[in-house]
Image (cartoon, grey):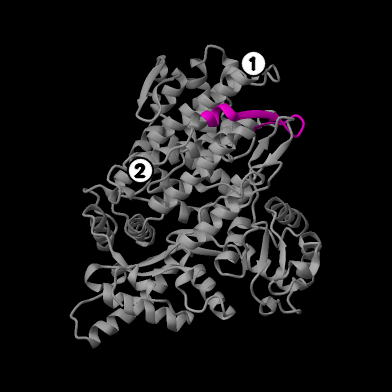
Amino acid sequence: MLRKIGKFEAYIPDRNLFDTFLKILSLTDFEQNEKFDSTLHLLYRFFLKFKGKYPHVFEDVFFNHDPDFPYSEQVEDCLTRLQESGFITRPNPSLNQYRIDVDLSDSRPDPSSPDFETLQQMAKDFEKEFRIKDGPSCRI
Amino acid sequence: MDPLAESKEYNKRIKTLLSGYLLPKRAFNDPGMKVIHDPLWGSRLFYPWEIAVLDTPLCQRLRRIYQLGTAYLTYPSAVHTRFSHTIGVTVLAGRLITRLKEKAEISGLVSTIEPKHIYTVRMAGLLHDVGHCFFSHASEQVLESILMPLMKYHNLGHSKPHEFMAYLILTSDYFREYWDTLVVPLFRKRDDAPNPEAIAKIIVGVPPSNPERFLQDIIYGPYDVDKLEYLYRDARTAGLEISYDIERYFYKITLVNSPADTWRLAMEHGGVSAVEQIVFSKMMLYSFVYHHHKVLTSDLLITDMLMELLNSGKDGHIIVEHPLDFLRYTDYDILSSILEGPSDRFKKLKEMILHRRLPKRCFVMNREFVVGIDLDISIKRSWDSLLDSLRQLPDEVMSIREAIVAEMNMKASKENLEREITVDDLFVVFPKLPKMEEAAYAPVVDINLNLHSMGQFFDLEGWQKTYDLKKLKGYFYASEPNIKLACEAVEQYLSKEYKLKFTDNAKTEAKIKP
């Protein structure tokens, strides 16, 4: 999307990763108080893989050129914003998991929206990769 | 405009810009080696080709861009410039690569470091900030959205605007011609001369080649010397007592061959504590300097001046018609007392900076001050929506300010206060958390040459984020006579528009008695 800043055209991304990821999380079977793996390099790799698979959805998510850790400012911003808003937290003492602190059903996208199936597929992939294998014991 | 045509237009404009910025000066004669004295890093030798480049107006203009913007209004000695930082980065890049070369030669493991690599990485250090524009922080904020389509076209969406500007300069035909004609002959062996394309790639975080990836790591990456330099210099000039063991840091960094054919930097296990010190220093600097409420408020005045410059039809000696025009001016030009400026408002804002008439806090926001946030998802959503609104581009935040100012004027007239309140009586900012996650995955090498991530040795990202989330604050500011009025109007606005109520801490932290 283009808009003006003074004389200049400024580019504003049509969608941001925060909204997309919130929709993905809301379409998983994760429930409130359930935890998922927060291993950062896995999360970043996951989004990098998604960018390759769904370029139109992740058009404005950029990664650096590190072979081990594909860092992305947009992914960091998204994870930070989820924590700042209190949607997810890293419960102490183990900081290697995120706990979903809210019922995300309100964030579910409209099933008639054009990306619904894509988001649903992403949610399945996400859950497969990040669900902590112990199951119910990860809940509080 | 289509990106290819736009790219050509940039190249054309860079030629005009550089024709004034790459005056040969002493480059026709051998400028010789020079020793430059720096209070942090001592007396250091610079090569003739470095002096030739440093002496161009392109680099000299960095003397007139403050490294910390207007932070000197809060920390009087924080008047160091991009130029002194550039000198420091060149020195540290040279020291680090020399140390790596010694280690490699002694261990007999590798012989990958040639003189050309040393010259390349030092030159990348010297040129890494040439793309900075006046009031770097405020300009970057606006330039990011202006330059993004072109950055995407060049597949450099991850880079910062000033890095991209440097890339455009160094890869331009004009710079190449200047380099080949005037700089390369200063090298004893022509083959030792760095390639400007490689330097440009290093600056935007792209390895020149896989075997030369370590060159990029030295300037751009989790172990880069840019960070080491600015943290130390910023802390020293602000008077903040931080320290880290840079010698240990340099001794413990090593080259690893991973994946195959890629040489990169990794920290030996024994150097992890040196990295911890640096991360801690960064957190302290954010807390005490970069996010200090007074530093943020003077930044806001600068941002408003910039927007006034861009939005006003009149130029008033400063002409910014193209994004590259941002490079024509420095902090000195914008704050110059002889600059008329495009409007009376610009003049007023400039005087507020020059006379240090900074607005004062009237309302402080922090997640923990929001009533009921842990109990109600709708409050969490409202809080998120508020943060999102306050972090938009400056002209979008302006609409929030206008709404609150309207409220303040209504209150003032009800109380029969004879004053006209404008948007220059109310400011707001909610900074973003510092970025740290990249450091969490910096590579650490063990004695068997296996690689691990830094996060395995201490939970860098976890504790830093938890700490910062507690400390991070946003501020509303008001001009002195309007503080109480603004506080009430802000409180009312946040309640009406965002359904958010704050504890008394929001006022007491602003030194307002509830």
Residue B49 can be seen, yes or no: yes
Q: Is residue B243 above or below residue B31?
A: below
Q: Is residue A53 above or below residue B210?
A: below
Residue B176 can be seen, yes or no: no
* Near-viewer residue (B426 or B282): B282
x 49%, y 68%: residue: B387
> Element type at marker 1?
helix
The residue range painted magenta reads: B248-265
Give left or right: position of A61 versus B317.
right
* Near-viewer residue (B78 or B446): B446
> Element type at marker 2?
loop
Residue under pointer 2: B66
Q: Position of residue B500 (x, y in %)?
A: 47, 79
Q: Chain of mark 2?
A: B
User: Residue B106 has which mark?
Assistant: 1
Q: Is B307 in the magenta?
A: no
Give left or right: position of A68 versus B235.
right
Give left or right: position of A134 versus B492.
right
Task: Classify residue A57 by image quadrant.
Answer: bottom right
**Image marks 1 and 2: residues in contact by CB distance under 8 Å:** no
